[in-house]
Image: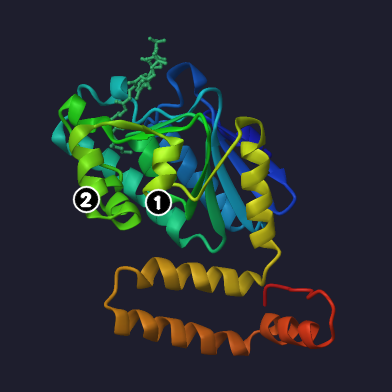
């Protein structure tokens, strides 16, 4: 069975070195239920061993994802809610640990768990039609997929508190202003912009890209001296790779490098 045939709630397509994963439940604005979480988990495992060097996550239709599936959550017990949230957190951790760039291409609603999923990617590229929010308080709950903590780290405590406590929905321009998204583009070029960005990253030294992602994701939660130690150690370790020899030799020879990821 091909990777694409393996999933009911996701569409998978490879473009160059980049795997494009599309959340595909447009009738419910790509709401995230347990099947979506399970399929994302498997899809990320496949991507890690696929030889691809970048991943773009997008949504079918007018939403990225309008949150966790409210119909599926409405009657959950606290134990079931905890299990669901733990599975969601595991997906977020996989996105942070996968040794390639992950970019969320958000062209519509990214609300609740949808905003949290986008936040779990390395960064977000949005279209002018994107809308972001953590409206959980309107439902009597809070974000449960890492949103409170990732949002505070991305946009600062005060903006995170305002978004999570008001449940307000903000547009792409405001999201860019507070640093939630890296770039806003027209809707018709959203996917190609995200894929081109991921492809450009995929063409850099793969071991270096994986290490710099790891150093940044882990270092940001450490005291500065420990984080700087992580950086020094990773910098030094890269001098034991073929990619470092090739990258520097190619510069000196005035040619493009041919990285092998070793
Ligand atoms: N869950 C289930 N179904 C949904 C969801 C959702 N989150 N969002 C939309 N839908 C469904 C609607 O019920 C509707 O179905 P139907 O056609 O059968 O009535 C269909 O999608 C289309 O939606 P609308 O008709 O409402 O479309 P509108 O364009 O009028 O409105 C909105 C779009 C504003 C996005 C609106 O749909 C909305 O407010 N949706 C809910 C947004 C929300 O509250 N999200 C947060 C959910 S809670 C959450 O994410 C907690 C995460 C923490 C746990 C995660 C663990 C993994």
Residue 62 relative to residue 142: left or right: right
Residue 78 in the image: state x and y as whole percent.
Answer: 14, 35
Q: Residue at x 66, y 36 (%)?
A: 189
Residue 61 in the image: state x and y as whole percent.
Answer: 55, 23
- Where on the picture, by quarter, is residue 145? top left
Residue 6 in the image: state x and y as whole percent.
Answer: 60, 35
Image colouring: rainbow
Q: Is residue 143 visible?
A: no
Q: Residue at x 61, y 34 (%)?
A: 186
Vertical comparison of 95 with 203: above or below: above
Vertical comparison of 67 with 48: above or below: above
**Mark 1, residue position:** 179
Q: Which of marks 1 and 2 is nearer the N terminus?
A: 2
Residue 163 relative to residue 90: left or right: left
Q: Is residue 178 visible?
A: yes
Mark 2 Cα within 10 Å, few/some/many (few <14, many 20+)? few
Q: Which of 115 and 173 is in front in this view?
A: 173
Q: Which of 179 and 207 is in front in this view?
A: 179
**Mark 2, residue position:** 158
> Within 8 Å of ligand 1, the CB of disc 2?
no
Quadrant of the drawing holding the C terminus: bottom right
Q: Residue at x 46, y 87 (%)?
A: 233
Q: Give the secondary structure at mark 2.
A: helix
> Within 8 Å of ligand 1, the CB of disc 1?
no
Residue 256 in the image: state x and y as whole percent.
Answer: 81, 74
Mark 1 Cα within 10 Å, few/some/many (few <14, many 20+)? some
Q: Give the secondary structure at mark 1.
A: loop
């Amino acid at each position: 069975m091909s990777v694409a045939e393996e999933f009911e709630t996701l569409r998978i397509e490879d473009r160059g070195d980049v795997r494009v994963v599309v959340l595909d439940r447009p009738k419910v604005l790509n709401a995230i239920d347990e099947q979506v979480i399970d399929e994302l988990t498997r899809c990320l495992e496949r991507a890690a061993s696929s030889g691809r060097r970048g991943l773009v996550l997008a949504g079918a239709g007018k939403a990225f994802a309008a949150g966790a599936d409210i119909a599926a959550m409405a009657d959950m017990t606290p134990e079931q809610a905890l299990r669901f949230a733990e599975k969601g957190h595991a997906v977020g951790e996989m996105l942070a640990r996968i040794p390639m760039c992950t970019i969320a291409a958000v062209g519509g609603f990214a609300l609740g768990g949808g905003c949290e999923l986008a936040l779990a990617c390395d960064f977000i590229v949005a279209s002018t039609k994107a809308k972001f929010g953590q409206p959980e308080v309107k439902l009597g709950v809070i974000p449960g997929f890492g949103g409170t903590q990732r949002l505070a780290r991305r946009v600062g405590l005060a903006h995170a508190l305002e978004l999570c406590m008001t449940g307000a929905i903000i547009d792409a321009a405001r999201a860019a202003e507070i640093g939630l998204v890296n770039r806003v583009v027209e809707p018709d070029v959203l996917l190609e912009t995200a894929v081109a960005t991921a492809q450009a990253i995929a063409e850099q030294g793969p071991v270096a890209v994986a290490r710099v992602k790891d150093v940044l994701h882990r270092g940001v939660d450490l005291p500065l001296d420990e984080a700087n130690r992580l950086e020094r150690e990773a910098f030094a370790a890269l001098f034991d790779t073929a990619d470092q020899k090739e990258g520097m030799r190619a510069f000196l020879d005035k040619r493009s490098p041919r990285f092998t990821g070793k």
